[in-house]
Image (cartoon, helix red, strand yellow):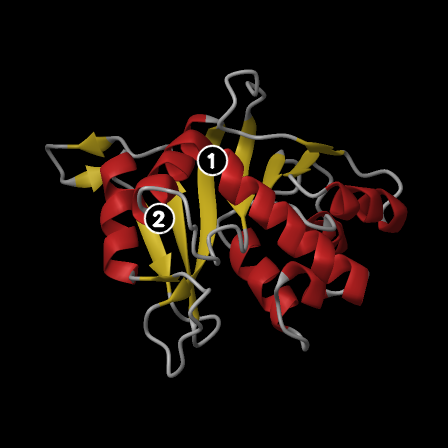
Amino acid sequence: MNSQDKALTIKRYANRYREHGYSPLSLGWGKGGRQKIRFGAMAGIGIGPSDSVLDVGCGFGDFQAYLKGQGWKGRYLGIDFVDDFLLEARKQHPQIRVKNADILSRSFVERFDFVVSSGIFNTRLKHEKGEYAYIRKMMARMLSLSRKGVACDFISSYVDFRNKTTFHAEPEKLCAIAKSLSRRVLMRHDYLPFEFMVYMYTNDGVDTRGGVFK
């Protein structure tokens, strides 16, 4: 993300945190049980009990707590730009591993079985040359850091109301982006009515004789 949009993002979330504290509202999500539904959809990519996970835009690190509640015992790293969120994550989850980092930085080289992100593409960027180009860059980087797969969620263009500051992604375009990066892709528009998620898998080799994945 460019420095201008990054500064705006940090300011927006810091202001929300000052108002709402430890709450999904600080992350730009509504009240209710939707966060748990999102977590279930992210875990549905196939995260196993010992798989390592990189959570990009981790917020308060609550996805780690969700996974642990499902019996998961793998290695976790959450990264975020917002220091207030990281401090709160350490407060809420004392053993959690989180840090302020940017996966687009060349210095970030640690790899994981799965890389996930929730909410990081929900806001329109004022200074990028195009949201889809930025999303593709991020998804490609996440896939390069993953041994098994990537899960990313988006606010859908199939909605009954649009917010001017929200980026409503077209599922068809995201599917095309994902397919340009991996031949093995799954798109889910079934877990919440106005959101969707894309899975990309690294094991996308094809047996051309049988026309199936290896």
* First-in-chain label (2 vs 1): 1
Image quadrant where residue 102 sits: top right
Amino acid under disc 2 = Glu
Residue at horizontal 38 percent and vertical 44 percent from the top: 135
Q: Is residue 143 left or right of residue 87?
A: left
Residue at horizontal 66 percent and vertical 50 percent from the top: 11
Between 145 and 20, the residue placed more toward the observer is 20
Q: How many marks?
A: 2
Residue 3 position in % (x across, y down): 52, 34
Quadrant of the image containing the C terminus: top left
> Which residue is denoted by mark 2 in the rendering?
131
Visible in this render: residue 75?
Answer: no
Residue 184 position in % (x across, y down): 29, 42
Residue 120 vertical position relative to residue 20 in the rendered view, above or below? above
Q: Mark 2 or 1, which is nearer the eye?
A: 1
Label 2 vs label 1: CA separation?
12 Å
Image quadrant where residue 164 sits: bottom left
Residue 59 position in % (x across, y down): 68, 50
Residue at horizontal 70 percent and vertical 45 percent from the top: 72
Residue 146 position in % (x across, y down): 48, 30
Amino acid under disc 1 = Asn
- The dot on residue 2 is 1
- The dot on residue 204 is none
Residue 194 vertical position relative to residue 27 in the rendered view, above or below? below
- SS of the residue under disc 2: helix
Between 127 and 91, the residue placed more toward the observer is 127
Between 191 and 106, the residue placed more toward the observer is 106
Residue 143 vertical position relative to residue 60 in the rendered view, above or below? above
Whether label 2 touches label 1, CB < 8 Å: no
Image quadrant where residue 100 sits: top right
Q: Residues within 10 Å of mark 2 (few under 14, many from 20)?
A: some
